[in-house]
Image: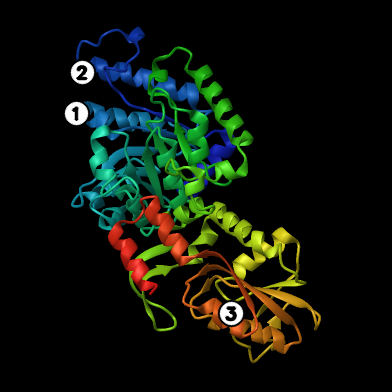
C-alpha cells in the first residue's frame, strides 16, 4: 500500500481529513504537568502528553505530523523520544514528518533514515534545491513528499509573491513541482488562512493532496478555506487541528466536533465550490470579460504560455495555447463545456462531431451535456477492422456541428468537415474555443462554413493585461504578433 492509498484508507475508515501535530515543547506542555526541572523531566512529561494525544485522536484523524525540529532541539533524548512516539502511532494511520528538509548533500542518508528506520510515510521538503533534492525520496515508491509552496510568514511575501502578486513565484513553484512526480508521490504544503491563495494553488494542482497549515488565524473562515482547498470529490486536503487543543482536557471531544464540522461542510459545498473558485481582482462587473475567470484559470494552470513558439503551420507566434491540460482539471473543463454549450445551443444540428485529437474530450462532454449523439472523423483510416472514415452511428443527410479547439489556419477543421460531408452528412457550423484572429473565420466562410468561437486571442490578451497577469511589454508583443 503506497502513501496515497494509506491516506485514503485512513480518511475512509475514520471519516476524517484531520491531522494532529505531535510536537514536544515546554511552551505548549499542558499546565497540569507543571514546570519540568530539567531536560529529562521535560522529555518524560512530553512523552506522556503526546501518547495521550494519540490515544484520544487515533479514531478521528487521517494523519499525524511530528515536527522534526522540536525533537532535534531536545538533543539525543529528543530523537529517542521521536522514535518512541512514532512506535505508538497506529500502523494504519500515515505519518508525515514535518522536516522542511533542504540539504541536498544529506538527502540520500536522510531518506534512508526516515523511510527505512523510522518507517514514516511522507516528509515535507523545502523547494529551493529543486528536483535533485526530491529524487532520493522518490526512490521509495510507497512513500511521498510534501513540498512547501506557500507560507503564512509575513516576511515571506517579498519572495513568494515576486515579481508581482498577480503572477507570484509560488504559483510558478506549484506548476514546477508537479513535474517532479505523480500525485501519489508528490504533494504540496500550503500555509495560509487566505482562501484566495489556496484556491489559486488548487486551480493549478487539481489532483495533488494539499497539507494545509496556518489556517486558524484570527478572522479566518473554515468553510471558505475548505471550499478553496478541497478537490472536486470533496477531499484532497489534510486539515490540521488547532495546536493549542492538545493542551485541552477535552481534546477527544474537540477533535470529534471539528471532524463533524468539516464533514458537514464537505457534504454541503456544491461541486463548483469544492472544485476551487479562482480569486479575481476587485473590478466592476462591467469592466470584466464574461469569461474572465476562465481566462485567468487557463493562464494559471499553464495553458497560455509566452515566448517564441513554432505552430503546426510553421508560423512563429509570441505565445502558445495548450488546451490539453484542461481534461486534468474537472472544474475548468466543466466551465469550458458550458462556454461551448452557450454557442451550440443556438445552432441547428442532429449530431456533434469532434475533430481528433484535441477536441474529442470537449465534443464528448458536449454530447453528454446537451444529450446529442456524437461522431468523429478519423485522423487516419486504418487498414484493418471496419476501415471507417467516420466513427459512430449516423444517417446521410443529417446536419453535424463540428467542434474543434483552436483556429490557427483552419486546416484541421475544414479537413474534418470535408470528411464528414464525404459520407453524406451536412456541415454548416464549426465551433472552436479560441480564434487566433488571422482571417481564419473568413477562410472558413469562403469554404461554406459559419465559424463561432468562445474566445479570441485579443480578448485573452486584453483580459490578462487588465487583470495584471501580464505586463505592458508582453501585451505589446502579443498585439504585434496579431498584426
Quarter location, residue 182:
bottom left
Q: Which mark is residue 43?
A: none
Please, what secondary structure does the residue beneath circle 2 have? Answer: helix
Residue at the extreme bottom of the image, as rendered: 383
**Left or right: 190 in relation to 369:** left
Is 325 above or below relative to 355? above
* Residue underneath mark 2: 39
Q: Residue at x 37, y 60 (%)?
A: 179
Residue at image location 27% in from the left, 17% down from the top: 27
**Foreground residue among 99 and 440:** 440
For residue 420, say whether it is visible. Answer: yes
> What is the quadrant of the C terminus in the image?
bottom left
User: Can I make out residue 379 in this image?
Assistant: no
Which of the two residues, 372 or 75, is positioned nearer the viewer here?
Answer: 372
In the displayed structure, does residue 101 sit left or right of residue 343?
Answer: left
Q: Are marks 3 and 2 in contact (CB under 8 Å)?
A: no
Q: Is residue 345 above or below residue 469?
A: below
Asked if the residue at tag 1 contacts the one at tag 2, i.e. Cβ–Cβ closer than 8 Å, the answer is: yes
Which mark lies nearer to you, 3 or 2?
3
Q: Which residue is mark 1?
A: 75
Residue for point 55% across, 30% down: 262
**Residue 342 location (% of width, % of height):** 65, 59
Q: CA distance from mark 3 to mark 1?
A: 68 Å
Could you say where residue 474 lies in the image, as x and y percent from the top left?
31, 62
As drawn, 59 above or below 386: above
Left or right of 39 on screen, residue 213: right
* SS of the residue under disc 1: loop
Amino acid at each position: 500500500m503506497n502513501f496515497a492509498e494509506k491516506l485514503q484508507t485512513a480518511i475512509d475508515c475514520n471519516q476524517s481529513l484531520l491531522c494532529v501535530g505531535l510536537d514536544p515543547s515546554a511552551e505548549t506542555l499542558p499546565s497540569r504537568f507543571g514546570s519540568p526541572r530539567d531536560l529529562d523531566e521535560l522529555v518524560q512529561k512530553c512523552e506522556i502528553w503526546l501518547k495521550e494525544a494519540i490515544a484520544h485522536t487515533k479514531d478521528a484523524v487521517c494523519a499525524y505530523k511530528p515536527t522534526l525540529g522540536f525533537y532535534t532541539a531536545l538533543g539525543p533524548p529528543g530523537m529517542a523520544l521521536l522514535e518512541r512516539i512514532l512506535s505508538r502511532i497506529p500502523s494504519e494511520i500515515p505519518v508525515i514528518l514535518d522536516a522542511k528538509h533542504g540539504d541536498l548533500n544529506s538527502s540520500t542518508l536522510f531518506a534512508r533514515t526516515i523511510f527505512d528506520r523510522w518507517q514514516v510515510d511522507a516528509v515535507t521538503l523545502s523547494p529551493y534545491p529543486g528536483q535533485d533534492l526530491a529524487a532520493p525520496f522518490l526512490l521509495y515508491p510507497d512513500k511521498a513528499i510534501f513540498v512547501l509552496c506557500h507560507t503564512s510568514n509575513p516576511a515571506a511575501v517579498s519572495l513568494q509573491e515576486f515579481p508581482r502578486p498577480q503572477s507570484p513565484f509560488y504559483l510558478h513553484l506549484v506548476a514546477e513541482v508537479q513535474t517532479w512526480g505523480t500525485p501519489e508521490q508528490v504533494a504540496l504544503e500550503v500555509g495560509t488562512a487566505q482562501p484566495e491563495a489556496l484556491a489559486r494553488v488548487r486551480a493549478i494542482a487539481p489532483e495533488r493532496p494539499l497539507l494545509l497549515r496556518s489556517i486558524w488565524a484570527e478572522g479566518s473562515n473554515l468553510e471558505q478555506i475548505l471550499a478553496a482547498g478541497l478537490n472536486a470529490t470533496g477531499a484532497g486536503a489534510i486539515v490540521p487541528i488547532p495546536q493549542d487543543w492538545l493542551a485541552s482536557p477535552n481534546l477527544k471531544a474537540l477533535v470529534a466536533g471539528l471532524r463533524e464540522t468539516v464533514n458537514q461542510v464537505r457534504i454541503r459545498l456544491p461541486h463548483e465550490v469544492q472544485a476551487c473558485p479562482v480569486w479575481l481582482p476587485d473590478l466592476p462587473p462591467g469592466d470584466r470579460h464574461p469569461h474572465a475567470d476562465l481566462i485567468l484559470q487557463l493562464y494559471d494552470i499553464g495553458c497560455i504560455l509566452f515566448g517564441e513558439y513554432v505552430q503546426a503551420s510553421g508560423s512563429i507566434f509570441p505565445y502558445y495555447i495548450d488546451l490539453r491540460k484542461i481534461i486534468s482539471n474537472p472544474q475548468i473543463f466543466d466551465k469550458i463545456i458550458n462556454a461551448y454549450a452557450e454557442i451550440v445551443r443556438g445552432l441547428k444540428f442532429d449530431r456533434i462531431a469532434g475533430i481528433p485529437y484535441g477536441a474529442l474530450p470537449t465534443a464528448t462532454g458536449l454530447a453528454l451535456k446537451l444529450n446529442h449523439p456524437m461522431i468523429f472523423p478519423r485522423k487516419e483510416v486504418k487498414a484493418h477492422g471496419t476501415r471507417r472514415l467516420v466513427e459512430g452511428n449516423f444517417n446521410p443527410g443529417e446536419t453535424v456541428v463540428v467542434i474543434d479547439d483552436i483556429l490557427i489556419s483552419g486546416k484541421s477543421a475544414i479537413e474534418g468537415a470535408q470528411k464528414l460531408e464525404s459520407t453524406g452528412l451536412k456541415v454548416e457550423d464549426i465551433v472552436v474555443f479560441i480564434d487566433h484572429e488571422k482571417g481564419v473565420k473568413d477562410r472558413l466562410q469562403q469554404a461554406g462554413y459559419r465559424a463561432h468561437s468562445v474566445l479570441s486571442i485579443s480578448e485573452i490578451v486584453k483580459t490578462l493585461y487588465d487583470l495584471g497577469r501580464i505586463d505592458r511589454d508582453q501585451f505589446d508583443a502579443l498585439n504585434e504578433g496579431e498584426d
